Structures are given as C-alpha cells and as structure tokens.
Amino acid sequence: MDDYLVGVLSNIGIISFVALSAYLLLLTGEISFGQQAFFAIGAYAAGIATALWGWPLSAALGWGAATAGAAAILVGIPTLRLHGLYFAIATLAFAEMVRLLFELFRYQLTIDGELVGPNGSDGFRGIRYIFENDVSSLQFLVLIYLLLIIALVAFMLLERSRLGVTFRMIGEDATLAELNGVAVARIKVLAAGLAGALAGIGGGLYAHLTTYVEPRIFDVMLGVHSLAYGLIGGLGTALGPLLGVVIDIGLLESVRVFAGYRMIIFGGLVAVLLIVRPRGLLDERAVHYLSRVWRR
Amino acid sequence: MLRLLFAGLIAAVCLAEAAAAQSMRAKADVECKPAGELLHYDCVIKLMNARTSEPLAGVTLMVGADMPSMPMMHNVRPVKAAPGADSGIYQARLVLEMHGDWAVQLNLSGPVRDRVVANIRFDPDRATPVVPSRARPGHKH
Amino acid sequence: MIDFVQNTIDGVMIGSSYALLALGFTLIFGVMRRLNLSYGPSIMIGAYLGTLVYVQLSAGPLVVVAVTVIGAVLAGVYVERLCFAPMAAGAGIASMVSSFAIWMQLEQAAILVLPQHTYPFPPLATVAPLELGPFLLRVDHLIMLAAALALSAAVYLLLYRSRFGLALRAIIENPTAAHLVGINVKAAVMLAFALASAVGGIAGYLVLAADQQVTPMFGMWATFKGLIAMMIGGLGSIPGAIVGGLVLGVVEAHSQWHFGPQVRDLVAYLLLFACLVLRPGGLLGRAPPMREPAFGRRGA
C-alpha cells in the first residue's frame, strides 16, 4: 500500500475519533467547540507515557483516554447549567485555555542522554514509540481502524440501548426528559466523559503517528472541523460524522482541482446544509428510511 | 463477534509492541527555496546522526508535510527525495496547498527508520525555518 | 506603583478597541439574539481590502478607512444573508455554527488573494509618545481611545435619538410587537448588521493602524477579543460592551506585564469561562433563559 494512501487513511481514522467525540455531545443536544482540548490532553498524556515513562502503547492509549475523560468530566460539571450558545462559548474558552496551558507546560526528562518531553511552545518531539518498537505504518493503520471499529460497534450498541435513547431524549428536550425521570445532569456528565475519552484515544494515536505534537495543532480549527463533520455527515448515526470526515478529507483533499479552495467549499457546505438540512445528510429520517429499505 | 474484535485488537497491539529496539536517531537541516511555480518549493535536506553528527547516506527519504494549525486536513503527497551531491544531502520538491507554517515530515526508511519534523514557514517569496515558540500566531499584542 | 498605573493606562487604551469590537458584537446579539462568530473575519476582509488599496494604489489613510469599513460591511451583509436571515426564529445556535463555518471561508478567501504572512497598514500617528510625568502615552493609542469614545457616543445617539434607533430598540424589546407596529424587522436587522460591521471596521482600522500591519490571524483575534469583552460586560448591553472591553484591556495589560503573552491570553479566557459559569449574563447584561430551543430539531 503506497505511503500516501496509508497517510490519508490514517488521518481519516484519527480525525474520526474527534468527530465522534463532538457527535456524542451533539446527541445530547449540546454544541461543543472544544473537543480538541481532550484530543490534546490524550496526545500529550499518551506521548509522555511512552516517551518519558516507557509504557507500552496500549497502556499509554488507555492513560490518554482516561486523563482526557477525567478532564471532560471536570469541565462538564460546572458547565451543566449552561446551554446553547453559552455552553458552546464555554467549551471554546476551555479549549483555548488548555492550548495555552500546553504552551506553558514543560516536563522534560533526560533519556539516553537527551532531553525529551513537552517543551512549551516548542512542542513535544521524539514520541518515537513506533520506531523504537518497529511498528510499520501499515500496522499502525490497522491499529487505528481496529480501535475505530470498536468505537463504532460501541456506538451501534449504544443507539439500541436504553442509554442511547436517553441521550437522544435529553437532546430533544431536556426538561421533558427530566420530567420523565431521567437524571439529566448525571447522564450529561457521563456523555461528556465518554466524549472526552474518545477524543483522548484519537489524540494518543495522533501523537504516536506523527511523533511530534505542538500546542498550535490543537486550536479552534480542529474543534470546528470535528463539529462540522457531524453536521455535514448527519446526526442520525455514528456513521454520519465518518461520512463527513470522508467527504472533507477524502474528496476535497484528493481531488486536486479543489486544492486551494477547500475551506471555502467546506465552510459553504456547512452553512448551506445548516439551512436546508440541519441534522446533516444522514439525519434521523434518512437513517430510518435506509434501515427500512435494508430490511426489505 | 465482539470477542473476535477484542482478540484482534490485542493481537494488533502485541504486534505493535514486538521488540526490535532501535536507538539510532536522526536529525536534519532543511533549507527550502521557492521553485518557480506557485506553492512549489525545492528543498535541500542534510541528514545526520543525531548524536555523532555524521552524515547519513543511502537512506530512503520520503518528504511530506502537514500544517500545525490544521492537523490532518491537508494531505501533501509525500515525495521521494533524491540523493544530492554530497553524502547525507538529499533534494526534494514539495508542492504545498497553502502558504503559511508547515511541519515538514522527513520519513526515513531503508537501513534506518526514523522521522524528523522541521517547522518551516512558506511564503510566496521565501521559506524560513521557524521556532514555534517565537512564531506564535494568534494574538498580536 | 508607576508600573501599575502605566499598565492600567495601556490597558484602558487597548481596552477601548476591545470595547468597540464588543460594541459591534453586542449590537448584533441585542437585535437578533444570536452570536455572529464571523464578526472578526468580516472585519478582516475589510482590512485586507484596505491594505490592498494602500499597497497597490498608495491611498491615503482616509481612503483606507473608507475601504475597510465598506469591505467589512459587505462581508457582514454576506454573513447575514447566508447564516442569519435564512434561519427560523428559534435556530440561533445553527446561525452561530454557520457563522463559524463561514469564518473558515472568509479566512481562506483572504489568504488566497493576499497570501503573505503580513501586510502593511498606514500608521495612526508617527510622532513620539507623549510623556505625562513618569508615564508614557502613545499618541496612536490616544487617537484610538478618542475615536472609540466618539464612536460609542455616536452609536448611543443613533440608538436613542433617531427613528432607526427607535426601531432597533423596539425590535430588541419585542420583535413580534415591533413587526405588528409596522416596523420592517428584516430590513432593520440587516441595517443593524451593517452598522455593527461598520463599527467593527473602524475598530479594526484603529487596531491595525496602531500596529501598522495586518496578518491573517486578525480575524480570529478580533472575534475572540470582542466576544470575551462582550461576555464580561453583558450580552446585548452597550454600556456592558464598553465596560467589558476596558476590564479586559486592563486585566490583559497587567497579566502580560507580570507573566508574559501566553498567560495574558490564558487569563482572558479564564475570565470568559468564569463569567460564563458564574454569571452568564455578564456584569451588566441580563441572565439567559434557562433552556434555549435546540437547533435543527427533527421535523422542525
């Protein structure tokens, strides 16, 4: 498999995690511009675990997901009272704070005679796990997609489960859900934690794929994009955000004609879709229709 | 079904952790110049052993790039660098999608596997290395 | 002590530009109850047009101001038509997200036309800073402060002494009633947008002229500063915008002096976050309703 294709597919896989993260929050009716913060936390935590503490990759990824999830819960609690645009701006503020904190964060250890570790704005170089352990880019790609498939299966199970229905209930009308006995606050915090952990896994994978992360990577662009993927691809199913990612990276990227105009097209697409089809391409109606056709 | 998936995951992760320790690290000096056409740049790369600074010859070098401020959203086709005049010198032509700050990825395969990342700002008329801490975008004051 | 006062002075100067940015934001929010996250980028479009005439045609500062304002207004109206007008009454969130997406569009359009990292802007004043005892006052900052005060007064007069202002205030109070009384709400809203963009254009010009350059990052910067200042002072409140801007400016100036630029920005966002969590209405605004309708509801 040629390097370019492996690269593009790896990127699609990793961004899907952040897209799914934003999607999970969208299910509960909240817009978050800040999932990139948990992506960042996952990336740094996992990178530190392998590069500085010598942990194996699986433990590092778990650690990244756990710290990101914990941070998400910590932020989810004070913002419970906020809704709509106030919540969105709060997530934005939080994500920027995290990014700025990483610009100030220095934690370096001397390994093999060299200083390794996050060094503020200069970033975190040398996350060389895949080189030190002879993981080929193809093997890493398989890992990314294995984890992604697990996440998707989990989402499919969620959609059919009581919890999934509860999420959508809260998204539809939280007051009504509360009146129906749903513990809205607790479920929302749970959703926030899960979303954070998802983004954290993506971050850990990203750090090991590129071997180098810096705070600039985790800025608002990433957050808006991950949100937009769900809005474009559709909120009816977890495959919606993936569709959004594929449309953006796959099509717009690979077709050279669009090269310089990508964001113009992408931004315009989001704006137009929000007018004509606010729940995205694969919205609940489309999913319902498709599943009926499938069963015939 | 789920069990199969979990088994597969564990297998993949174990593969990933198969030990074949490599402690050779590389470092690089990258210099790029605009090459006539818009968004085309000719880059001269000097690869060295990070510790001993001796030039690394005979390495297969693929050069890619990603934008730090928009991660994973550009997919610059990696180009194979051609060996240059001296040992350890390689040349590649990069075709970018936008001007601005890019993280140029030097992927070494062949006898040595490694990746070195160089931060470079590509303007229409020149390309200058940037140290991220001194090139903070965002707030101007 | 001297440092403290000097920082406060600097903070007030910069804060006045933040106040202007917040003023535009708050006008849109007050009238439409929606947040326009493309505010900064539309000002940047104006600024890029301004620098274009400055560089290509060697235009004088007044022409650059005019072009900047006109450009900002055109971009603002574009955003209004695409992101705000077509959305149904309750879909404020969708407008906000849409405007954020258009931010990407505007930014890329600007970079396509002018790809360099920085472009020059005519300076506000080229004389040496004034000295008032031990304190230094930059003349261009003074001009900025004076212009901000004048502009705020002008907007205030427009809102409280003109028919258009009366119509806007009616819409802010109760859009349905305003419609019933015969006010053309859609047209008034679009004009309010244009007004906000014009104010933003002037604010942008002042900031960029004081800095003598414009970079592609300006759009996001302006949006964030205006947003933070507005949220601190209170959404939908004009005195709030001014207060918020000045508070932000002073807090930033002190943070930067003691801890550097990253902490300065960190403190600004922390202030925003704290305001949202503790007092979402801001210092002078009104508290938000408990549940806003979700966007893009099924069947809606």
Image (cartoon, helix red, strand yellow):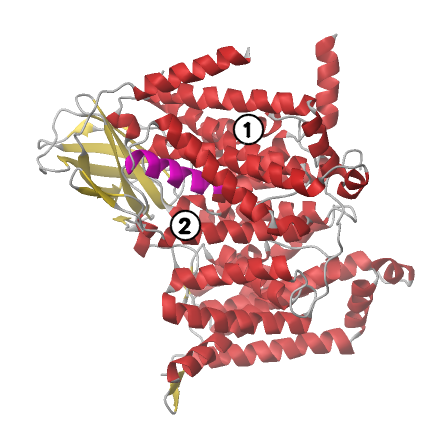
Residue identifier under label 1:
A247
Amino acid type at mark 2: Pro
Is C31 a magenta residue? no
* C275 left or right of A120 in image: right
What residue sits 57% from the left and 30% below the top? A244
Against A110, is C48 above or below? below
* Residue A280 in sight: yes
Magenta residues: mostly which secondary structure? Answer: helix
Q: Decide if residue A5 is on the left or right side of residue C158.
A: left
Q: Which of B106 and C239 is in front in this view?
A: C239
Q: Does the magenta stretch include residue A49?
A: yes
Q: Name the residue under label 2.
A: C115
Residue C79 in percent (x, y) is at 64, 51
Q: What stretch is highlighted in magenta?
A: A38-52
Rendering coords of residue C288 (x, y %): 73, 58
Helix, strand or loop for disc 2: loop
Binning the other alpha carbons within 10 Å of mark 1 as few (below 14), some (14 to 19) or many (20 upward) gives some
Quarter of the figure with the C terminus of chain A: top right
Q: Are marks 1 and 2 in contact (CB under 8 Å)?
A: no
Residue C22, compared with residue A228, is above or below; it is: below
